[in-house]
Amino acid sequence: MSARKPVTIQGTEDIRAFFDDLASDYRDLHGNAERQLRYRLKVIERLLGAVPRAAENGSRSHDETASCNTLLEIGCGNGMHLIALAHRFRRCIGVDLSPKMIAAAESVRRIHPLRERIELFPAPAETLEGVRDTSVDVALCVGVLEHIPNQEAALGQIRRVLKPGGAFICLTPNAGFLWHRWAPRLGRACQYLSTDRFLDAGEVRRLIREAGLDMARLGYWRFVPRGDLSPLLGWGLTVLDWPGRWLNRAVLRGGLCFKAVRRAYPADE
């Protein structure tokens, strides 16, 4: 397999154009797409914990806390995670830098039985334009944080839109993973974009703290970029994930996942 070079990025417009080009045929290249989606949703559900479910018919519950929860997905892409989680939230907002990704998600939303709960519009993570202050119960980011050039600004915006006590849930590649450490030394690129920035656990903790959020849970998830690897290497790294999981060894886990919380008032300020 020939070495892949990251796409050179000069600015936000280049990132937008990259994902616009992917929108018409976006799919998981690192394994069975349906199985990988089910697995990621399980990881998200574990991190979500006891988030109240919205009524299936969209009506308001007698328990106000169970009917007013709002999910925001940052970098929602074609909506695969947001739409799959719509049964858990009364309102679901999806934003993405790419207008064409939003259009792809909209084509799915229009025929979904819970479409009235779902709202989609383009917005960069660094500004989250169109999302009101303290209006979101859960902010979700799956495989996107690494593509955001200014991660500090994005985390500041996430804190802005979260309600006191609201949670930020993120799945991202783990910079401490064996392959992510050694690939550059072998002349192989892990990044798709030249501006991609992978984080390890220590860096995530620092960024969360500097954003004014509290880390509630940090762990790992199974992410092996098999679509970028030879079959043998992809298989070997997948096998190593099992002892990595049971021994909790970061070097054997390809993905980092965490839940951070905005403090409730009055200690928040």
Image: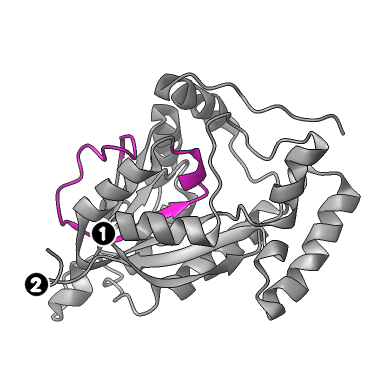
Residue 18 percent coordinates (x, y) = 53, 25
At label 2, counting other C-alpha atoms closer than 10 Å, the crowd grade (few under 14, some 14-19, many 20 or more) is few
Give the magenta range: 121-148
Query: Quick one: quadrant of the N terminus?
Result: top right
Give the secondary structure at mark 2.
loop
Instruction: Give the image location of residue 76, x and y in percent.
Output: 42, 45
Quarter occupied by residue 148: top left
Identify the residue shown where x is 55% and y is 56%: 200
Task: Kindly identify which residue carries mark 2.
Answer: 266
Left or right, residue 9 beside residue 216:
right
Nearer to me, 115 or 210: 210
Q: Is residue 134 visible?
A: yes
Which residue corresponds to the image point at 33% horizontal and 35% vertical from the top-left?
A: 124
Q: Residue at x 56, y 46 (%)?
A: 198
**53 is higher (above) or lower (below) than 109:** below
Horizontally, is 87 left or right of 248 in the view? left
Establish if 189 lies above or below 108.
Answer: above
Choose the circle earlier in sequence order: 1 or 2: 1
Amino acid bearing label 2? Pro
Horizontally, residue 252 falls left or right of residue 120, namely right
Q: In terms of depth relative to the viewer, which is nearer, 25 or 73?
A: 73
Name the residue tied to disc 1.
212
Question: Quadrant location of residue 220?
Answer: bottom right
- Measure how far apart labels 1 and 2 are at the Cα level: 14 Å
Residue 217 part of the magenta segment: no
Classify 10 Å Cα crowding around label 1: few (below 14), some (14-19), many (20 and above): some
Front in this rendered view, residue 36 or 211:
211
Picture coordinates of residue 235 (x, y %)? 85, 57
The residue at the point 38 percent across, 46 percent down is 109
